[in-house]
Amino acid sequence: MIRSMIKSTGRYLPENKVTNQNLAELMDTTDEWIVQRTGIESRYWVKEGDDIGTSDLAYEAAKIALERAGWDPNELDLIVIATMTPDVNVPGSGVFLQDKLGAKNVPALDIRQQCTGFLYGLEICDAYIKSEKAKKILLVGAEYQSRYLEVNTEYRDTAVIFADGAGASCIEAIETDDDAGFITSIMHSDGKYSQALRAGLPARKSGYAIDPTVIENKEHFPFMDGKTVYKLAVTRLPRITEELLEKANMSIDDIDLFIPHQANLRINEAFRERMKIPKEKIYNNIERYGNTTAATIPIALDELLENKIVKNGDTIMFFGLGAGLNWGGVIYKMI
Ligand SMILES: CC(C)(COP(=O)(O)OP(=O)(O)OC[C@H]1O[C@@H](n2cnc3c(N)ncnc32)[C@H](O)[C@@H]1OP(=O)(O)O)[C@@H](O)C(=O)NCCC(=O)NCCS
């Protein structure tokens, strides 16, 4: 049977570390508030003035993953990039990444699922592999969010949360009779909540490609109804976990490690308590990286593999919820 296997991973964070104290110098906030409400202690933002785009962050992570897999970029059957902060509006970041890698004529697909981008990406890669359309796929989650943030007191709720970074995975088709690799996934969307977390660019509400009222009303900066997002997350993440376990015919004890999207430590803690999961069975790194949206899960996986926290035979669950509203999860058995 054909299965999808994560063969290698890589991550890249810009060098410029921004602490809560740095932010407290720019707006009315405190380290204490940020740590208590979000769990974040520091994050990485591309240095102001650096002339780079999201695809440059993706490229750095991809290079590492490809090298670890021993793959030449030209061997790839598909490149998938998940980002909500593309280099430019058109074309997508996938083609920039493809060009930087020198992966001549390899199809490059952008997906716009925000915090669940990497999860949707995994599901798409698995579908390509199981349908025998691809054998070797590069999947990257990358964000350059600091470019879009307004760093002042008015926007302090989003400014302290979002961050830059990239995580990459090489995904390969393998033949095995074992129940291993990508086991199952479930994705959901609910556009009813599209206003809870949004940014208004590009926008065409009038005859202009960019409506001046969008700028006047500051709709181009991310808007977050934090309380609504929080409530949706703490109810829907437990539900998706139950759905996934049922689909895989597993119990919660069969999962060796839960790897949630790093939106907010309080959300992940509420999830853990609700599901009665011991602390050592859930992985968080938001304190060091902030919320890198599509990049949180692949960055976490890369750390876990590098530090040998996950090993062959372990069953892990990736899951998350974010703008859209989109939410979902993947069960994967390490091989
Ligand atoms: C954003 C979030 C941390 C705010 O926490 P909260 O307890 O809901 O706080 P509130 O929105 O009620 O705001 C409480 C106060 O803190 C203030 N505040 C917001 N951001 C602040 C900051 N960075 N520093 C200091 N104060 C801040 C608010 O202005 C408000 O002040 P007021 O009472 O004078 O109006 C919380 O709603 C949350 O975690 N939501 C989920 C967000 C998320 O996960 N987003 C990513 C999705 S992928």
Image (cartoon, rainbow, N blue to C red):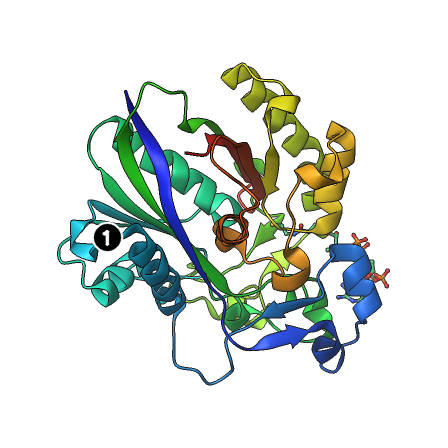
Q: Which residue is mark 1?
A: 71
Amino acid marked by disc 1? Trp
Q: Nearer the viewer, residue 72 or 53?
A: 72
- Between 103 and 325, the one lying in front of the other is 103
Which residue is pictured at 21% across the width and 56% down the height? 73
Left or right: 313 with respect to 75?
Answer: right
Residue most extreme to the left: 105
Tell me what residue is drawn at x 37 percent, y 20 percent.
178
Front in this rendered view, residue 91 or 17:
17
List x then y, in percent, for residue 47.
51, 80
Instruction: Inspect this view and state whether residue 66 appears.
Output: yes
Task: Say which residue appears at 49% left-offset and 48% top-offset.
Answer: 305
Q: How many marks?
A: 1
Q: Is residue 322 left or right of residue 79?
A: right
Ligand 1, by image quadrant, is bottom right
Residue 9: image location, x then y, percent: 40, 51
- Tag 1 secondary structure: loop
Q: Nearer the viewer, residue 26 or 32?
A: 32
Horizontally, residue 102 falls left or right of residue 246, namely left
From the Cβ of disc 1, is ligand 1 less than 8 Å away? Answer: no
Q: Quadrant of the N terminus?
A: top left
Q: Residue 224 lies in what quarter of the image?
A: bottom right
Residue 88: percent from left, percent from top: 35, 67
Residue under the image location 65 percent in, 32 percent down: 236
Residue 6 against residue 236 in the figure, above or below: below
Name above or below for residue 31 compared with residue 321. below
For label 1, count other residues whose C-alpha is less than 10 Å away and answer few (under 14), some (14-19) or many (20+).
some
Rendered-image quadrant of the C terminus:
top left
